[in-house]
Image: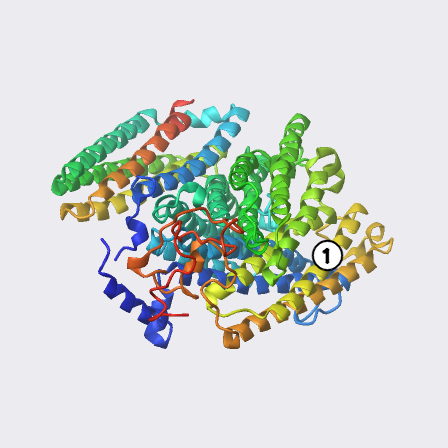
Amino acid sequence: MVEPAVDLTHGHAHDDHAHHGPQGWLKYLWSTDHKVIAMQYMFTGMFMALVGGFMAYVFRMQLAFPDISVPGWGGVVSMGEYNSLVTNHGTIMIFWVAMPVLLAAFGNYLIPLMVGADDMVFPKINRLSFQVFFVSTIVILASLFVEGGGFAGAWTAYPPLSADATYNLTPLGSTLWVIGVGLEFVAFLLGGINFITTLMNSRAPGMRAFDVPLVVWMIVVASILFMLSVGPLLAGAIMLVFDQTIGTGFYNPATGGDPILWQHLFWFFGHPEVYVVLLPAMGVVIEIITTFARKKVFGYRIVIFTVVATGVLSFFVWAHHQFIAGIDPRMANIFTITTLLISVPIAELCFVYIATLYGGSIRLTTPMLWALAFVAEFLIGGVTGIFLGAAGADIYFHDTYFVLAHFHYTFFPIAIIGTYAAFTYWFPKMFGKMMDDRLGKWHFWLTIIPFNMIFIPLFVLGMGGQHRRISNYSSFSELAGDGFQSVRIFATISLLIMLAAQLIFFYNCWKSWRSGPKAPKNPWKANSLEWTTESPPPHGNWRPDRMPVVYRGPYEYSVPDREEDYWPQNEPDGAPLQVVDPDAGEQGR
Amino acid sequence: MRPIATTRAATGTETGKLAVWWVLASEVVIFGGLLASYVMFRLGHPEWADAAAVTNTHIGAFNTFVLLTSSLTAVLAHQAAERGDGKSAAKFLYFTIGGAAVFIGVKTYEWWYEISHGYTITSNGFWAFYYTAAGLHAFHVIAGAIIMAFVARDAAKNLELHRVELIGIYWHFVDIVWIFLFPLLYIAK
C-alpha cells in the first residue's frame, strides 16, 4: 500500500522545484498535488477578478459620466457593450471568482491538510477538474471577442432575451456563455465529489466527524448543495442551447414552451448557490475568529446542525426571485415564509460568531479585521434581504438598485472580504512568508470604507425607484432628476478609490513573497492540523511515517490548567507541552 | 502510486463506491430536472398526446428488455468479480456492452424513421423533450459502455476487479433512468 518512507521523503524535494525549466512546466501543469491545483484555481480566479473589476470600472464610468469616452476602454460604451459588460461582470464574479477561489482553491488547499491526509482521494480527477475549469475560462474569455461581442442577456439569462439572438444581439456570445458556464459546472462537480469523499473517508486516525474544523464542514456541505442543485440547471442549459442554436421552443410559448420554466430551473440552482459560496466564507471567518479571540467556538455542533438546516431550507426559497414574474400569489406567500425562515439560521450563525468573540482575548490582526468586517457587512446584506424576501415590499424594490445593493452587500463580503480573510490568514502556510501587517491594514481600511461608499448610495437610488440595467439615465427625464446623478458619480468615484487600493494588496503580496520574514510552522498558534506541518507544506503534506493522529476537536483554546492557550489536535493527552520535533534537525523551520 | 488518502476508509465504505453514489446523486437531479419540466408541460398540454401516439411502444419495449438484460449481465459480472474470476467478469461485461450496442442501434433506427417522417426536434414541445431526454440518456449509455470497455480490459487480466461493481452501479442507474423515460415518452399516449 504505502511505499517505504525513504523513497517519498527524497521524492518531494525534487517535486517542490518542479516548475523550473521546460520539462518542469509540463510537470507543473499536470501536477496532481492538491496544493498546486489550489494555487492554479486561486490565480485563475484572481486573474478573472481583475477582468470582472475592469468591467465594473467601465460601466460605472458610463453610468456616472454618460456617453463620454472611458479611459482604458477606448471610446464611448455603447448600449450593447453596456449590456454585455454587466452580464459578464456578474457571470465572471460569481462563477469564475467566488466559486473557484472560495470553494475550489481553499477547498483544495484546506481539506486534505485539515483532515490530515496527504492529498485528495482522487488526485487525477482533481487535476481534470481544474483542466475543465481552465477550458471553461478560455471559453468565457473568448466569448467576449467573437462577432457581436460577449453575451448581453444578463447573468440570469432569462429567455426570451437569452434564447433569441434577435433580442440579445449576441448570437455567438450567448451560446459560448452557456457552454462556458456548463463546463464550469462540470469542473465543480468533479471537484465536489473529491471534497465530499475526502472528508468522509480519508480523515486522520482518531478524527471523528465532530473533530473536523468547521471550514471543512462548511465547504463540504456547500459542495453537496452545489451537487444537488446544479442538475436541473444543467438540464435547463441544454434546453437553452437547443433553443438558441437549433430552434427548439422549450422557452417559447408559441411552440408550447414557457419562459418561466428557465426562471424556476435557474433559481432552483441560484438560491442554493448563494449558500454554496456563503458557507465557505462563513467557515473561514469562524476559523479566524476563534483563533484570534483565543476562545473555543460557541456551540460547535449547533453550528453544524444550523448549516445543514440552512442547506435543506435553501432548496425551498427559490421563487422569491420571481415575485413579479406572474407566479400564483398563494405560492408567493409560501415562498415569503420560507425566505424569512432562512434568515433565522443565518442570524443564528452571526450570533454564534459574536458569542465566540465575547470574553475572548481579541487580537486585531489583518485577517481578524477582515473576519470582523465580514460579520458586520454581511449583516447589512442579510437585513436588507428581509425587505426583498417579503413579497409585498419586493414588488416595489424589484429590479431597482436596492436589489443590486443588497446583492453586493452579500456577495462582496463573501467573495472579496471572505477571500481576503482566508488569503491573509493562510498566506504564511501557503507561501512560507509572513505578510506585512501594516500594509494589510491600509489595504483593509481602503477597501472597506469605499465599499460602503459605493453601495450605501445605491440603496438610496433603489429606494428612490431607480431601475437597473439602464446605460444612460439622462435619456429618461423621470429617472435623471432629484440629484440622483450626483449620487451615481459619488458611487463611481468610491469604486475608483477601492480599485486603486487593491494595488496595495498586490504590492504587499509581492513584497512579502520576495522579502517577508520566514513563516514558522504555526504563526497564529492555531490548533488545526495544517499548522503542524512545514510552511509551505511539502509534497504529501507530512512525512508518510509521521502522518498526524488526532486526539481532540480543533477549538481547544485557553483551556484552563494548560500553560499554552492552545492545544493542537495532534498532541496526545498528557504529553509534555513542548514536544521535541523529530523533524526539526533535518527539515527545520 | 496512490496517495495514502485513497487507501483510507474512515466510513468503512470503499472510497470508489462512495464517489459513484455521489456521481449518481448529481445525475439524478439532472434527469430529475428535465423530466419534472417535461411532466409539468405535458400536464398543461393534453394535445401532446397526439405526438406521443407516433412513438413505437413495441420498439421501446424491446429496448427496455435489452437494457434490463444488460443489467443482469452486469450483476453476473459483479458476482464473477467477487469470486475473483476476472476472465468471466470481463466476458459478462462484454455482453453488457453488446446490449448497449443493440440499444443504440435500435434507437438509431427509431430516430431515423421518425426524422424521415418529419418528426424532428423542432416539430413541437413533445418532440423537443423526446429527443433531448432520450438523447441525454443515450449519451450516458455510450459513455458507460466506453468506460465499461476499459474496466473489462483490466478485469480480463484480473486487475482492479473492484471497478466491476462500480461500473455496474452506474449501469443500473442508466437502466433506471430508461425505466422512467419509457412510460413517459412511449406508453403515456
Q: Helix, strand or loop at disc 1?
A: helix
| Image quadrant occupied by the C terminus of chain B | top left
Q: Position of residue A258 (x, y in %)?
A: 58, 35
| Amino acid marked by disc 1 | Asn
Task: State the residue at coordinates (50%, 59%).
Answer: A525
Q: Is B91 located above or below residue A376 in the figure? A: above
The front one of A507 and A399 is A507
User: Which quadrant of the figure has residue A127?
Assistant: bottom left
Which of A170 and A459 lies nearest the eye of the viewer? A459
Q: Is residue A16 above or below residue B81?
A: below
Camera sees residue A150: no
Q: Alpha-carbon neighbours of circle 1 within 10 Å: few (<14), some, or many (≥20)? A: some
On the question of residue A541 being in view, the answer is yes
What residue do we see at 34% from left, 25% from top?
Answer: B57
Label 1 sits on residue: A452
Position of residue A577 in the picture relative to residue A421 (left or right):
left
The outermost residue toward the front is A561
Figure check: B117 above or below A276: above
Instruction: State the image coordinates of residue A220 (x, y, percent, origin top left).
Output: 46, 45
Q: Quadrant of residue A25?
A: bottom left
Between A22 and B95, the one nearer to me in the picture: A22
- State the residue at coordinates (25%, 32%): B71
Of the 4 image quadrants, the one containing the N terminus of chain B is bottom left
Q: Chain of mark 1?
A: A
Left or right relative to B12: residue A471:
right
